[in-house]
Image: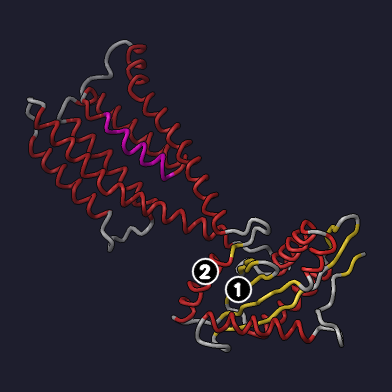
Amino acid sequence: MTEPDTQAPADTRRRSIDEHAAFLRSMSQLGWLVLLVCALYLLLNGTPAPHPRVVLAAMGLFALAAAGLRWRRTRVRSAPLRIALDAAATIVFITVMATQSGGASSPLVNLYLLPVVMAAVTLGSGGTLAVFLAVCVAWLALMAGYGGMEGPVLALLARILGQLGPFALVAYLTQRLASTIISARRQLAEFAERDTLTGLVNERSFKEMLQREHAGRQQGGSGYSLLKVDIDALGQVNETAGYEAGNAAIRNVAEAIKRTIRATDLAARAGGDEFVVLLPGASPEVAGVVAQRIRNAVFKSLFQSGSRMQRMTVSVGVGAYPQDGRTADSALATAEKRMHQDKNLRRKAGDPEPPQPSRL
């Protein structure tokens, strides 16, 4: 017996990567906007920058950094790392621009909020804290460089609190809000991919994952096997004990399947009384063993039906790639065909239906 299917964490990681990638695309314009705001401020301020060459060099380097981090061939593949580097580059650029426009008193220091928000939305609490501390160090360096550390201690602390306090509040509130939104989005996405009765993935999501698995196997490596599982005589349970008992039977079979398969396998409800299971890397022989384990697990699992306990049986068919065809649909069709053969073979002589559920 192995752990239940862990496809959900894998899907969560994939969605997290997609969210980071989407945020990087949206941030691609923000760097240029920061560049434009700084340039316009220095141009319209009326006070020339002390070192124009420093300004031009900083703008050029920041533009190169912004473009380089978004270049597809960049060596930085990790989306969170790219966001962290983007935030660092933005902090450095804003600091340089502030040195040319009044130091810690420059209105441009308000742009420090941008990397803080960027981190809060994507990097979690640890990343947000790191970026906020970097902003604090940069602003304090501006203060020290322009003699802002002189004067009464209380007045100095008040100025620091007045400037960095709002940054801290924005970081905290944005991180909490982003966590809530991301959690809600993931729950909605999971609801769209999951069968509400059993918690297994639904048929549409299963077919998408199967096609990805099939495409990967076509490029090399071992094949995979599929199991088609059908609950025997579920209609009789619905008629005699009601649909609540039928739903309990479906959930009971789903739990038995999840207990039987590996953590790398994927089980789905294919609608009604049918399930389908993907066994990556499994040969037809191994899949046959798993099929028998599922039959045994279901038969041993009891569920409440009214005032009595009841057990069910299932019919299972095996299909495999590449043994049963060159496409995922052909392997799935073979599993369907063999499932019906299994149901017919296990019928009692003269019975029009497969073995009936037993009540204890």
Viewer-side residue, 266 vs 286: 266
Q: Position of residue 279 (x, y in %)?
A: 61, 75
Say if 250 sits above or below 288 in the image: above
Q: Are marks 1 and 2 in contact (CB under 8 Å)?
A: yes
> Quick one: SS at disc 1?
strand
Say if 71 sits above or below 278 in the image: above
- Residue 68's quadrant in the figure? bottom left
The residue under label 1 is 278
Q: Position of residue 327 (x, y in %)?
A: 50, 83
Q: Earlier in the sequence, mark 1 or mark 2?
A: 2
Q: Residue furthest right?
A: 360
The quadrant of the picture occupied by the C terminus is bottom right
The residue under label 2 is 209
**Circle 1: residue type:** Leu
**Circle 2: residue type:** Met
Viewer-side residue, 296 vs 44: 296
Query: How far apart, in angstroms, are the residues tagged by discs 1 and 2?
Result: 9 Å
Range of residues picked out in magenta: 110-123
- Residue 346's quadrant in the figure? bottom right
> Crowding near pointer 1: few (<14 within 10 Å), some, many (20+)?
many
> Quick one: SS at disc 2?
helix
Left or right placement of residue 242 versus residue 179 in this view: right
> Crowding near pointer 2: few (<14 within 10 Å), some, many (20+)?
some
